[in-house]
Image (cartoon, grey):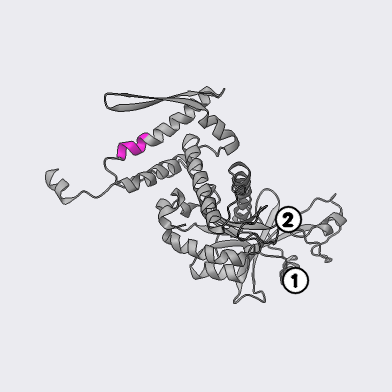
Amino acid sequence: MAASDVDAQRAGGIGRAVGARIDASIKPLYGRQEGAEIGYNPHKRGRPSHVLHTYWVGNLRLVLDVQVSPGKQHSSARARAGLACLLDELGDRRPALVRGDCGYGNEGILTVLEARSQPYLLRLRQTKNVKRLIVRQAGRADWTRADAQGWQSADAELKLDGWSRTRRVVLLRHRLRDDEPLNALRETTQLRLPIEDDAVLNGHEMWEYTVLVTDVAYPLETVAQLYRDRCDCENGFDELKNQWGLGGFTTQDIARCQTTARIMALVYNGWSWYCRAAHPEGRLEAITSRPLLLAAVGRSTSHAGSTQLYLTPLHAMTQHIKSLVGNIRKALDHVKGLAEQLPKTDRWRELLRYICASIVPSTSLQVVRPRPSLQQIATG
Protein backbone atom coordinates (compact mmCIF):
# COMPACT_ATOMS: atom_id res chain seq x y z
CA MET A 1 0.00 0.00 0.00
CA ALA A 2 1.63 3.22 -1.12
CA ALA A 3 1.84 6.11 1.30
CA SER A 4 -0.45 8.22 -0.88
CA ASP A 5 -3.16 5.53 -0.78
CA VAL A 6 -3.12 4.98 2.95
CA ASP A 7 -6.24 6.04 4.80
CA ALA A 8 -6.56 8.79 7.35
CA GLN A 9 -4.85 7.07 10.22
CA ARG A 10 -1.49 7.99 8.69
CA ALA A 11 -2.27 11.69 8.38
CA GLY A 12 -1.33 14.36 10.84
CA GLY A 13 0.52 12.07 13.21
CA ILE A 14 -2.74 10.52 14.45
CA GLY A 15 -1.06 7.17 14.99
CA ARG A 16 1.46 8.65 17.41
CA ALA A 17 -1.00 8.59 20.29
CA VAL A 18 -1.95 4.95 19.93
CA GLY A 19 -0.39 1.52 19.81
CA ALA A 20 -0.23 -0.71 16.76
CA ARG A 21 -0.60 -4.47 16.72
CA ILE A 22 0.62 -7.07 14.27
CA ASP A 23 -1.23 -10.35 13.84
CA ALA A 24 -1.91 -13.11 11.33
CA SER A 25 -5.27 -14.59 10.28
CA ILE A 26 -5.87 -17.77 8.29
CA LYS A 27 -8.26 -17.68 5.33
CA PRO A 28 -9.25 -21.20 4.15
CA LEU A 29 -9.51 -21.68 0.38
CA TYR A 30 -11.75 -24.04 -1.55
CA GLY A 31 -10.42 -23.69 -5.09
CA ARG A 32 -7.16 -23.66 -7.03
CA GLN A 33 -6.02 -20.16 -6.24
CA GLU A 34 -2.41 -19.10 -6.46
CA GLY A 35 -0.67 -19.54 -3.11
CA ALA A 36 -3.24 -22.05 -1.84
CA GLU A 37 -0.90 -24.11 0.33
CA ILE A 38 -1.46 -26.45 3.23
CA GLY A 39 0.07 -24.76 6.25
CA TYR A 40 -1.07 -23.87 9.76
CA ASN A 41 -4.86 -23.96 9.73
CA PRO A 42 -6.37 -24.51 13.20
CA HIS A 43 -10.02 -24.53 12.09
CA LYS A 44 -9.81 -26.43 8.79
CA ARG A 45 -6.87 -28.78 9.21
CA GLY A 46 -5.52 -30.07 5.94
CA ARG A 47 -7.30 -27.35 3.98
CA PRO A 48 -5.21 -25.00 1.77
CA SER A 49 -5.24 -21.40 2.88
CA HIS A 50 -3.92 -17.88 2.57
CA VAL A 51 -2.42 -15.93 5.46
CA LEU A 52 -3.44 -12.33 6.14
CA HIS A 53 -0.69 -10.48 8.01
CA THR A 54 -2.50 -7.44 9.42
CA TYR A 55 -1.03 -4.28 10.92
CA TRP A 56 -3.60 -2.67 13.15
CA VAL A 57 -4.02 0.58 15.12
CA GLY A 58 -5.38 -0.74 18.39
CA ASN A 59 -7.12 2.17 20.09
CA LEU A 60 -8.76 3.52 16.95
CA ARG A 61 -9.48 0.12 15.37
CA LEU A 62 -8.00 1.05 12.02
CA VAL A 63 -6.09 -1.12 9.58
CA LEU A 64 -2.69 0.18 8.53
CA ASP A 65 -2.03 -2.56 6.00
CA VAL A 66 -2.92 -6.14 5.04
CA GLN A 67 -0.34 -8.44 3.50
CA VAL A 68 -1.65 -11.61 1.79
CA SER A 69 0.79 -14.55 1.74
CA PRO A 70 0.59 -18.25 0.77
CA GLY A 71 -0.65 -20.66 3.42
CA LYS A 72 2.78 -21.85 4.51
CA GLN A 73 4.05 -18.33 5.20
CA HIS A 74 2.24 -17.87 8.50
CA SER A 75 5.23 -17.25 10.75
CA SER A 76 6.34 -13.83 11.93
CA ALA A 77 9.42 -14.07 9.71
CA ARG A 78 7.13 -13.65 6.69
CA ALA A 79 5.64 -10.48 8.19
CA ARG A 80 9.03 -8.93 8.95
CA ALA A 81 9.61 -7.44 5.51
CA GLY A 82 6.10 -5.97 5.39
CA LEU A 83 6.53 -4.49 8.85
CA ALA A 84 9.84 -2.87 7.92
CA CYS A 85 8.34 -1.42 4.73
CA LEU A 86 5.33 -0.07 6.61
CA LEU A 87 7.44 1.62 9.29
CA ASP A 88 9.62 3.20 6.60
CA GLU A 89 6.53 4.54 4.83
CA LEU A 90 5.15 6.04 8.01
CA GLY A 91 8.38 7.85 8.84
CA ASP A 92 7.81 10.27 11.72
CA ARG A 93 4.13 9.28 11.85
CA ARG A 94 4.79 5.84 13.30
CA PRO A 95 2.67 4.51 16.18
CA ALA A 96 3.85 5.20 19.70
CA LEU A 97 4.16 1.47 20.39
CA VAL A 98 4.15 -1.83 18.48
CA ARG A 99 2.53 -4.75 20.28
CA GLY A 100 2.38 -8.42 19.37
CA ASP A 101 1.89 -11.86 20.87
CA CYS A 102 4.53 -14.53 21.45
CA GLY A 103 4.82 -15.30 17.74
CA TYR A 104 6.53 -11.93 17.21
CA GLY A 105 8.84 -11.84 20.23
CA ASN A 106 11.90 -13.07 18.35
CA GLU A 107 15.23 -11.66 17.21
CA GLY A 108 14.12 -10.95 13.64
CA ILE A 109 11.20 -8.70 14.59
CA LEU A 110 13.15 -7.07 17.43
CA THR A 111 15.99 -6.21 15.08
CA VAL A 112 13.61 -4.56 12.59
CA LEU A 113 12.06 -2.45 15.34
CA GLU A 114 15.31 -1.49 17.05
CA ALA A 115 16.96 -0.51 13.78
CA ARG A 116 14.21 2.10 13.34
CA SER A 117 14.08 3.19 17.01
CA GLN A 118 10.50 1.93 17.16
CA PRO A 119 9.24 1.26 20.74
CA TYR A 120 7.76 -2.21 21.20
CA LEU A 121 6.01 -4.45 23.72
CA LEU A 122 6.02 -8.11 22.69
CA ARG A 123 5.32 -11.31 24.54
CA LEU A 124 7.89 -14.10 24.79
CA ARG A 125 7.36 -17.80 24.38
CA GLN A 126 7.86 -19.80 27.55
CA THR A 127 11.05 -21.51 26.47
CA LYS A 128 13.44 -23.20 28.90
CA ASN A 129 15.47 -20.05 29.48
CA VAL A 130 12.33 -18.01 30.06
CA LYS A 131 11.12 -20.59 32.58
CA ARG A 132 14.46 -20.47 34.34
CA LEU A 133 14.11 -16.71 34.58
CA ILE A 134 10.67 -17.09 36.14
CA VAL A 135 12.01 -19.54 38.73
CA ARG A 136 14.82 -17.14 39.64
CA GLN A 137 12.53 -14.12 39.89
CA ALA A 138 9.57 -15.82 41.61
CA GLY A 139 10.99 -15.33 45.10
CA ARG A 140 11.61 -11.60 44.73
CA ALA A 141 10.12 -9.37 47.38
CA ASP A 142 9.78 -6.26 45.22
CA TRP A 143 6.91 -7.33 42.99
CA THR A 144 4.84 -4.25 42.13
CA ARG A 145 1.06 -4.28 42.11
CA ALA A 146 0.16 -3.66 38.47
CA ASP A 147 -3.61 -3.13 38.60
CA ALA A 148 -6.76 -3.72 40.59
CA GLN A 149 -7.22 -7.19 39.08
CA GLY A 150 -4.41 -8.66 41.12
CA TRP A 151 -1.59 -8.63 38.59
CA GLN A 152 1.93 -8.04 39.87
CA SER A 153 4.93 -6.96 37.82
CA ALA A 154 8.71 -6.98 38.06
CA ASP A 155 11.46 -6.13 35.59
CA ALA A 156 14.67 -7.96 34.77
CA GLU A 157 17.20 -8.44 31.99
CA LEU A 158 17.44 -11.45 29.72
CA LYS A 159 19.57 -12.66 26.82
CA LEU A 160 18.22 -15.69 25.02
CA ASP A 161 20.38 -17.99 22.90
CA GLY A 162 19.16 -16.51 19.62
CA TRP A 163 19.43 -12.90 20.72
CA SER A 164 22.26 -10.60 19.78
CA ARG A 165 22.19 -8.68 23.06
CA THR A 166 20.60 -8.40 26.49
CA ARG A 167 17.16 -6.82 26.60
CA ARG A 168 14.74 -5.60 29.24
CA VAL A 169 11.89 -7.94 30.11
CA VAL A 170 8.84 -7.40 32.31
CA LEU A 171 7.40 -10.32 34.26
CA LEU A 172 3.70 -10.30 35.02
CA ARG A 173 2.04 -12.74 37.37
CA HIS A 174 -1.46 -13.32 38.65
CA ARG A 175 -2.52 -15.64 41.42
CA LEU A 176 -4.90 -18.33 40.27
CA ARG A 177 -7.99 -19.30 42.18
CA ASP A 178 -7.42 -21.70 45.06
CA ASP A 179 -10.27 -23.98 44.00
CA GLU A 180 -8.91 -24.52 40.49
CA PRO A 181 -7.66 -28.10 40.16
CA LEU A 182 -3.95 -28.63 39.63
CA ASN A 183 -4.48 -31.12 36.79
CA ALA A 184 -6.36 -28.49 34.82
CA LEU A 185 -3.41 -26.15 35.23
CA ARG A 186 -0.96 -28.72 33.90
CA GLU A 187 -3.11 -29.29 30.81
CA THR A 188 -2.81 -25.67 29.73
CA THR A 189 -0.09 -24.86 27.24
CA GLN A 190 0.69 -21.18 27.20
CA LEU A 191 0.22 -18.81 30.12
CA ARG A 192 -0.05 -20.93 33.23
CA LEU A 193 3.22 -22.32 34.42
CA PRO A 194 3.11 -24.76 37.37
CA ILE A 195 6.67 -25.19 38.64
CA GLU A 196 7.52 -27.60 41.44
CA ASP A 197 9.19 -24.97 43.56
CA ASP A 198 8.22 -23.53 46.94
CA ALA A 199 8.49 -19.99 45.62
CA VAL A 200 5.93 -20.71 42.90
CA LEU A 201 3.83 -23.55 44.30
CA ASN A 202 3.04 -22.84 47.94
CA GLY A 203 0.27 -25.15 49.03
CA HIS A 204 -2.69 -24.08 46.91
CA GLU A 205 -0.99 -20.87 45.79
CA MET A 206 -0.48 -21.09 42.04
CA TRP A 207 0.66 -18.25 39.80
CA GLU A 208 0.07 -17.48 36.15
CA TYR A 209 3.09 -15.88 34.48
CA THR A 210 3.57 -13.77 31.36
CA VAL A 211 6.94 -12.44 30.20
CA LEU A 212 7.15 -9.38 27.94
CA VAL A 213 10.16 -7.90 26.18
CA THR A 214 10.16 -4.12 25.76
CA ASP A 215 12.43 -1.12 25.33
CA VAL A 216 10.06 1.52 26.74
CA ALA A 217 10.48 3.24 30.08
CA TYR A 218 6.84 3.14 31.11
CA PRO A 219 6.16 2.55 34.82
CA LEU A 220 5.81 -1.11 35.77
CA GLU A 221 2.28 -0.68 37.04
CA THR A 222 1.10 0.41 33.56
CA VAL A 223 2.67 -2.33 31.45
CA ALA A 224 0.09 -5.01 32.30
CA GLN A 225 -2.87 -2.89 31.19
CA LEU A 226 -0.97 -1.59 28.18
CA TYR A 227 -0.44 -5.12 26.90
CA ARG A 228 -3.95 -6.20 27.87
CA ASP A 229 -5.40 -3.42 25.69
CA ARG A 230 -3.96 -5.30 22.74
CA CYS A 231 -6.69 -7.91 23.21
CA ASP A 232 -9.31 -5.39 22.14
CA CYS A 233 -7.99 -5.80 18.60
CA GLU A 234 -9.53 -9.28 18.51
CA ASN A 235 -12.95 -7.64 18.31
CA GLY A 236 -11.80 -5.70 15.27
CA PHE A 237 -10.40 -8.80 13.59
CA ASP A 238 -13.65 -10.63 14.25
CA GLU A 239 -15.61 -7.72 12.76
CA LEU A 240 -13.37 -7.59 9.69
CA LYS A 241 -13.70 -11.30 8.94
CA ASN A 242 -17.33 -11.91 9.87
CA GLN A 243 -19.03 -8.60 9.08
CA TRP A 244 -16.87 -7.11 6.33
CA GLY A 245 -15.86 -10.31 4.52
CA LEU A 246 -12.09 -9.97 4.76
CA GLY A 247 -11.74 -13.75 4.54
CA GLY A 248 -14.73 -14.36 2.28
CA PHE A 249 -13.39 -13.53 -1.18
CA THR A 250 -11.49 -15.64 -3.69
CA THR A 251 -9.55 -14.75 -6.84
CA GLN A 252 -7.30 -16.78 -9.08
CA ASP A 253 -4.05 -14.91 -8.46
CA ILE A 254 -2.65 -13.69 -5.18
CA ALA A 255 -2.02 -10.15 -6.47
CA ARG A 256 -5.75 -9.50 -6.84
CA CYS A 257 -6.32 -11.06 -3.42
CA GLN A 258 -3.84 -8.53 -2.05
CA THR A 259 -5.60 -5.63 -3.76
CA THR A 260 -9.04 -6.79 -2.63
CA ALA A 261 -7.91 -7.18 0.98
CA ARG A 262 -6.51 -3.64 1.03
CA ILE A 263 -9.68 -2.22 -0.54
CA MET A 264 -11.70 -3.90 2.20
CA ALA A 265 -9.37 -2.42 4.80
CA LEU A 266 -9.85 1.07 3.34
CA VAL A 267 -13.64 0.66 3.29
CA TYR A 268 -13.55 -0.53 6.90
CA ASN A 269 -11.39 2.44 7.90
CA GLY A 270 -13.69 4.90 6.14
CA TRP A 271 -16.74 3.48 7.90
CA SER A 272 -14.89 3.57 11.24
CA TRP A 273 -14.15 7.27 10.84
CA TYR A 274 -17.72 7.93 9.75
CA CYS A 275 -19.11 6.17 12.82
CA ARG A 276 -16.71 7.97 15.16
CA ALA A 277 -17.83 11.28 13.69
CA ALA A 278 -21.44 10.26 14.37
CA HIS A 279 -20.77 8.79 17.82
CA PRO A 280 -17.48 10.03 19.27
CA GLU A 281 -18.31 8.63 22.73
CA GLY A 282 -17.64 5.06 21.64
CA ARG A 283 -17.30 2.61 18.77
CA LEU A 284 -20.25 1.30 16.80
CA GLU A 285 -20.14 -2.27 15.53
CA ALA A 286 -20.87 -2.79 11.86
CA ILE A 287 -23.68 -5.24 12.55
CA THR A 288 -25.68 -2.47 14.27
CA SER A 289 -24.29 0.73 12.75
CA ARG A 290 -24.91 -0.17 9.12
CA PRO A 291 -28.68 -0.72 9.45
CA LEU A 292 -28.79 2.31 11.76
CA LEU A 293 -27.07 4.77 9.42
CA LEU A 294 -27.74 3.28 5.98
CA ALA A 295 -31.45 2.42 6.20
CA ALA A 296 -32.92 5.70 4.95
CA VAL A 297 -34.62 7.08 1.87
CA GLY A 298 -32.89 10.12 0.43
CA ARG A 299 -34.31 12.94 -1.69
CA SER A 300 -32.17 15.66 -3.23
CA THR A 301 -33.52 19.13 -3.99
CA SER A 302 -31.82 22.09 -5.68
CA HIS A 303 -32.82 25.73 -5.29
CA ALA A 304 -30.99 29.04 -5.75
CA GLY A 305 -27.72 27.34 -6.52
CA SER A 306 -27.73 25.13 -3.41
CA THR A 307 -28.47 21.44 -3.10
CA GLN A 308 -30.04 19.87 -0.03
CA LEU A 309 -30.43 16.20 0.84
CA TYR A 310 -33.46 15.09 2.86
CA LEU A 311 -33.23 11.72 4.61
CA THR A 312 -36.18 9.71 5.92
CA PRO A 313 -34.95 7.01 8.34
CA LEU A 314 -36.55 3.58 8.16
CA HIS A 315 -35.18 2.51 11.53
CA ALA A 316 -37.25 2.61 14.72
CA MET A 317 -34.61 4.69 16.56
CA THR A 318 -35.35 7.87 14.61
CA GLN A 319 -34.38 10.35 17.32
CA HIS A 320 -31.06 8.59 17.93
CA ILE A 321 -30.34 8.61 14.21
CA LYS A 322 -31.04 12.35 14.04
CA SER A 323 -28.45 13.02 16.75
CA LEU A 324 -25.87 10.86 14.95
CA VAL A 325 -26.47 12.55 11.61
CA GLY A 326 -26.32 15.92 13.38
CA ASN A 327 -22.83 15.10 14.67
CA ILE A 328 -21.73 14.16 11.16
CA ARG A 329 -23.11 17.42 9.83
CA LYS A 330 -21.16 19.38 12.46
CA ALA A 331 -17.95 17.67 11.34
CA LEU A 332 -18.63 18.46 7.68
CA ASP A 333 -19.61 22.05 8.47
CA HIS A 334 -16.32 22.47 10.33
CA VAL A 335 -14.37 21.45 7.24
CA LYS A 336 -16.65 23.46 4.97
CA GLY A 337 -16.00 26.57 6.99
CA LEU A 338 -12.26 26.17 6.44
CA ALA A 339 -12.44 25.01 2.83
CA GLU A 340 -11.78 28.44 1.41
CA GLN A 341 -8.60 28.80 3.43
CA LEU A 342 -7.22 25.24 3.29
CA PRO A 343 -5.79 23.48 0.26
CA LYS A 344 -7.83 20.59 -1.05
CA THR A 345 -5.26 18.06 0.13
CA ASP A 346 -5.73 19.22 3.75
CA ARG A 347 -9.50 18.83 4.01
CA TRP A 348 -9.39 15.15 4.84
CA ARG A 349 -6.71 15.72 7.46
CA GLU A 350 -8.70 18.54 9.02
CA LEU A 351 -11.77 16.29 9.22
CA LEU A 352 -9.74 13.66 11.06
CA ARG A 353 -8.40 16.22 13.48
CA TYR A 354 -11.93 17.30 14.25
CA ILE A 355 -13.02 13.69 14.87
CA CYS A 356 -10.02 12.97 17.10
CA ALA A 357 -10.65 16.15 19.08
CA SER A 358 -14.24 14.95 19.59
CA ILE A 359 -13.03 11.55 20.78
CA VAL A 360 -10.53 13.10 23.21
CA PRO A 361 -12.04 16.41 24.35
CA SER A 362 -8.90 17.35 26.28
CA THR A 363 -6.99 17.55 23.00
CA SER A 364 -7.03 21.08 21.63
CA LEU A 365 -8.10 21.37 18.01
CA GLN A 366 -5.23 22.98 16.16
CA VAL A 367 -6.23 24.28 12.77
CA VAL A 368 -3.36 24.46 10.31
CA ARG A 369 -3.95 27.48 8.12
CA PRO A 370 -1.97 28.10 4.93
CA ARG A 371 0.59 30.85 4.87
CA PRO A 372 -0.69 33.91 2.94
CA SER A 373 0.94 34.66 -0.36
CA LEU A 374 2.77 37.92 -1.11
CA GLN A 375 -0.16 39.10 -3.22
CA GLN A 376 -2.59 38.51 -0.36
CA ILE A 377 -0.34 40.45 2.01
CA ALA A 378 -0.11 43.37 -0.44
CA THR A 379 -3.87 43.54 -1.00
CA GLY A 380 -4.86 42.77 2.60
* Image: 321 above or below 372: above
Displayed quadrant of residue 353? top left
> What residue is rendered at 62% in x and 57% in y?
33
Query: Are the residues tagged 2 and 1 within 8 Å (C-beta)?
Result: no
- Where residue 251 sits: x, y (%)? 58, 52
The amino acid pointed to by label 2 is Pro
Displayed quadrant of residue 19? bottom right
For the question of whether residue 362 can be seen, the reply is no
- Where residue 262 sits: x, y (%)? 51, 52
> What residue is rendered at 63% in x and 65% in y?
105
Looking at the rendering, the stretch of residues picked out in magenta corresponds to 333-338
Secondary element at tag 2: loop
Asked whether, in this view, residue 2 is left or right of residue 200, the answer is left
Asked whether, in this view, residue 73 is left or right of residue 369, the answer is right
Mark 2 or mark 1: whose residue is earlier in sequence: 2
* Residue 42 - label: 2
- In the rendered image, residue 334 lying in the magenta stretch gets the answer yes
- Where residue 107 sits: x, y (%)? 61, 71
Residue pointed to by mark 1: 128
